[in-house]
Amino acid sequence: MSNTGVADGLEDKSGNKPVTRRRFLGCAAVGGAAVIGSVGVGAGIDESLKRSNESTQATENQEALKRLLLRSQEGPSGKRFPVLDLHSHPSLKAYMFRQRFWKTHKASPGVSPTSLVVDVDALVNGGTGAFLCTAYALEREFFSDVIPLRVLSMLHPRPHRMATAPMNVLAMEHLDKAEAMVAETNRRRGDIVALAKSYSDMKRIVGEGRVCMLHAMEGAHHLAGKTELVDDFFNRGVCMMTVPHLYPNEAGGCVDLLTAYRKHSWARRSFSDKYQDSSGLSPWGHELVEKLLDVGIVVDMVHGTMEYRRQIIGIAKKHPKRRPITISHIGIEKNPEAGMGPSPEDVRAIADTGGVVGLMMVHHGHGASQDPVEAMLHAVEYLVKHGGEDVVAIGSDFDGYAETPKGLASPRDFGAVRTALLAKYTEEQTAKFLFGNGDRLLRMGWGKA
């Protein structure tokens, strides 16, 4: 369900000005310099008035957004049901393509290559309470394995930097970009989004009726084999780390999701088998998982093989701090054992640690013929059957290049999921699925209380 609400009409945020207008403004700026020099004090007054008007508009916008956010979270009884999204990537497109989080974007089904799906209006209209903004710098292997990227990295300075700069530096730049997104949004739209650097921060921000952003990271490749960097990211406010990702890294192997792309004409000489490795945790990976559990960064094992996941669960069960483990974002497949899963064994094991499985906004193996919201309900049933109602959570993977169906293409569509859950489950169960279980994961697993 796409409900644009009042927030979308508060100001023109498209930013698509015609070239002739830009030229006119450029000429006006040149002429204006002379005018400012002669007017002096008058120009200063005009600038002060402009800032005052912008501040007033942002405040009015903020109040309207807050009202819409609270209204979007409400169920039929008037009780609030905010969403906690455990996995999304708006900073990825903001970093790579300079997309603006404060602007409104039209989300379409399928894959959105450059335009944002997660923006402030989409989050507000969907009744989002909190979302993990997951930092992800492309693995080095992409620039060797994918020919178009290899060529781009040779010709353009930005891809070249992405292909050559230290991974931990790039990861910090992605965190910087996420924080800049929040700052720019609040300057232009009012103080509606806030970054949480502790669990108590998150509870306060959501309680104030604002949208809470939290830092997360995807892939141990950002650490370049140095467990000591975990402390740097923990101190920066990172609450979750996906250890395996699209290519094997120092922590071990991964599920091969890439070689299937060779069916596309542009990728026939890319995504080589030689870059893939389906092994479990390496000795360093074992050390890393111990470190993450010790400091309190939630361990996400989503891209790991079945053996990889069993090893992580085994470490967590023996660790003295008894932290929960998660699969932050996944689709429920018809044959879980053949792909990423999660298998019934995965779900039970995660539930036993107090962890959760985050459901992506996808068809969940049912195909385009079935209503996607119904497919989400079937996915919830699967998790409840094998792990109980405390294991269900939301992990959209929006802006992470997953293919989304019509009706689940944006955070706006959290509203349709909320409505469907309330029609089938109790208010208490729905509150758990949308927010409460993810909240417990962070309360138990994040070392920053």
Image: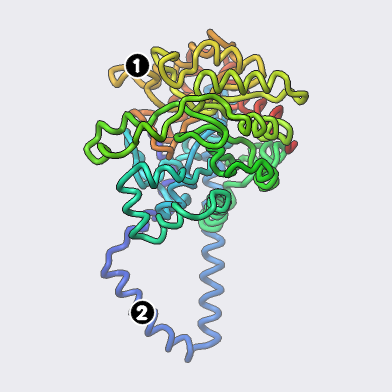
Q: Amino acid at mark 2?
A: Ala
Q: Which residue is mark 1?
A: 366
Q: Quadrant of residue 336?
A: top left
Query: For the residues carrying marks 1 and 2, which lies nearer the camera in this image?
Result: 1
Asked if one can make out residue 119 in the rendered structure from this viewpoint, the answer is no
Q: Looking at the picture, which amino acid does disc 1 mark?
A: His
User: Dot 1: within a 10 Å radius of its alpha carbon, few (fewer than 14), some, or many (20 or more) residues?
Assistant: some
| Percent of width and height locating residue 110 | 32, 34
Q: Position of residue 399 (x, y in %)?
A: 43, 40
Camera sees residue 341:
yes
Query: Viewer-proximal residue, 147 or 414?
Result: 147
Question: Residue at image x 38%, y 45%?
Answer: 144
Q: Quadrant of the image for the N terminus?
A: top left
Q: Residue at x 45, y 34 (%)?
A: 246
Q: Which residue is mark 2?
A: 28
Quadrant of the snapshot with the C terminus: top right
Give percent across and percent down for residue 289: 65, 30
On screen, residue 437 versus residue 406, left or right, reads right
Counting residues from the start of the chain, the first of labels 1 and 2 encountered is: 2
Q: Secondary structure at mark 2?
A: helix
